Image (tube, grey):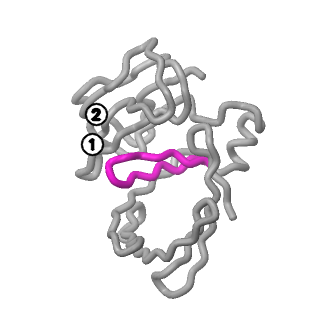
Amino acid sequence: MQHYRHGGGQVGVAVQRTAADRFTVTLDGRPRTVEAVLADSSTLRLVVDGVAHTVRIARSGAAYHVAIGGETYVLTPEAAAAAAGGASAVLAAPQIVAPMPGKVLQVLVRVGQRVQTGDGLLILEAMKMEHRMIAEAPATVRAVHVADGQMVDGGAVLVELEY
C-alpha cells in the first residue's frame, strides 16, 4: 500500500491488476473494482461502480495533481512528504502551481486572506475543463501571482500560502 498526503491528512492506496483493464483499488481500506483505460499520457478513463470518469494527472516534483469532476487534488507520496519536512511539519505545498497550461478564469482569494482546508483559491480552465484549485490545509494567502483571464504555463506558481 502506498500512502499519500492530501492537505493535512493521509490517504492509503493499493492497486492490484485483476484483468487487462480491470483493477481492485483499495482506498483507505475500502476495495473497489475499477475499469481503467489510458487515453493519453495524462488522461485516464475510469469506470467505478458503473459511473464513468475522466481523470487528468500531472506531476510537479514529487506531487501528483489529479483533476476529476472539476476539482484538483494534490497528492504527495508519504516518503517524499516526510523527507521534505519530517512527520511533524505541515505537509501541504506552500505554492499552488498550475498542473497544466491553461487560463485563470477566476481568482477567489486576496493577499492576507485566511483560508481553511478545501477553500477555493482559483479556477483554472485547462483541457476544456474547469479545475478548482483548493487549499490543502489552513493557511494565509502570502501572494497571488495571477489575475482573472491570464494564460499560464504548466508548473507556473499561481498562489503562495503561509502555514
Q: Is residue 135 above or below residue 53?
A: above
Residue 125 — which label? 1
Magenta region: 62-76
Residue 24 position in % (x across, y down): 55, 76
Please give the residue where the numbered disc 2 appears in the rendered image.
Answer: 104
Q: Residue at x 37, y 21 (%)?
A: 109
Q: Residue at x 27, y 42 (%)?
A: 125
Q: Residue at x 33, y 44 (%)?
A: 131
Q: Main secondary structure of the magenta part?
A: strand
Outermost residue on the bottom side: it is 19
**C-alpha distance separating marks 1 and 2:** 6 Å
Residue 144 position in % (x across, y down): 40, 20
Q: Quadrant of the N terminus?
A: bottom right
Circles 1 and 2: CB distance less than 8 Å? Answer: yes
Q: Earlier in the sequence, mark 1 or mark 2?
A: 2
Element carrying mark 2:
strand
Q: Residue at x 47, y 23 (%)?
A: 115
Q: Is residue 2 above or below residue 24?
A: above
Residue type, label 1: Glu
Q: Is residue 3 above or below residue 99?
A: below
Q: Quadrant of the C terminus?
A: top right
Q: Is residue 87 magenta?
A: no
